[in-house]
Every structure is written in structure tokens, then in C-alpha cells.
Amino acid sequence: QVQLVESGGGLVQAGDSLRLSCAASRRTFSSYAMGWFRQAPGKEREFVATINWNGARTFYADSVKGRFTISRDNAKNVVYLQMNSLKPEDTAVYYCAAATSTAWGTSQTYDYGYWGQGTQVTVSS
């Protein structure tokens, strides 16, 4: 079992930056690919970014490419999402997740077996 706790959300203005953190409870954190997803009101949860087990490979949704950066610190059991040039359409609850079917990073929701409780990000125009 892996417990994931997100933090770092908040209310910002368009163009601002935020860094989300996701702390994992398990020492085997380094064996999991990790991902960030988001869900806006009235919309389905969507993929944002993923990183493989050792941080060497990342993949992003087109909507955030060039603005968001996913990274991880396996010594601290933490994965980050640096969000720059935020837009109102980035407003959502952001979730981190640990992939249980692959260590190589994946954008598919069904590959993730552990989810955090989410952190709200609100971007005002």
C-alpha cells in the first residue's frame, strides 16, 4: 500500500507559478512511475504529466508542455510538479498517482493503482 499526500495548491493569478509536491509513504517509492492528473468541475480527470521510476523519462499532455515540469526525488520519496505561466484553464483539483502496472511512465489512468486526495489549484484571470 502506498499513501500519497499532495500539497502546494492555492489561488494564483494568470501568469504566476506554483509547485505541487506529492509525498509517498513507502520506501519502495523509487520503483513506481508517478503521474499527475487533474480534474476541473464538470469534466473528467485528465492526464497532466508522468515520470518514470528513476526520473530519466518524462511525458506531458500537450496542454501543459513547455509550462509544467515533473520531477522526483527518490531519496525523499517526493514527486513535484512545477507549474509556470499558469492559465485560468489550469484551474482544477490536481492528483498525484503511483503506477502499479509499469515503472516507465504512463498517461493511462488505469495504470495507476494509488492516488492522493488532491490539491486545489485556482488561477484567476
Image (tube, grey):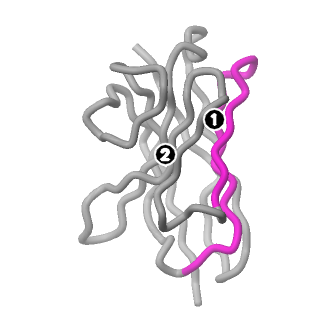
Residue 28 image position (x, y, % from top left): 56, 9
Q: Label 2 neighbourhood size at 10 Å, few (<14), some (14-19), many (20+)?
A: many
Alpha carbons under labels 1 and 2: distance apart? 9 Å
Viewer-proximal residue among 42 and 62: 62
Which numbered disc covers residue 79?
1
Query: Disc 1 residue type?
Result: Val
Which numbered disc covers residue 60?
none
Q: Secondary structure at mark 2?
A: strand
Residue 94 image position (x, y, % from top left): 47, 54
Residue drawn at x 30%, y 40% is 109
Residue 83 image position (x, y, % from top left): 66, 61
For the residues labelled 1 and 2, say whether their Cβ atoms are less than 8 Å apart: yes
Q: Is residue 49 left or right of residue 85?
A: left
- Counting residues from the start of the chain, the first of labels 1 and 2 encountered is 2
Residue 85 image position (x, y, % from top left): 69, 74
From the viewer's perspective, is residue 5 above or below residue 63?
A: above
Viewer-proximal residue among 20 and 68: 68
Which quarter of the picture shows residue 106?
top left
Q: Secondary structure at mark 1?
A: strand
Q: Is residue 113 left or right of residue 96?
A: left
From the viewer's perspective, is residue 58 above or below residue 84?
A: above
Residue drawn at x 48%, y 67% is 63
Which quarter of the picture shows residue 116?
top left
Instruction: Please tell me whether residue 116 belongs to the stretch shown in magenta.
Output: no
Query: Disc 2 residue type?
Result: Trp
Residue span colored magenta: 68-87
Viewer-proximal residue among 62 and 124: 62
* Residue at the disc numbered 2: 36
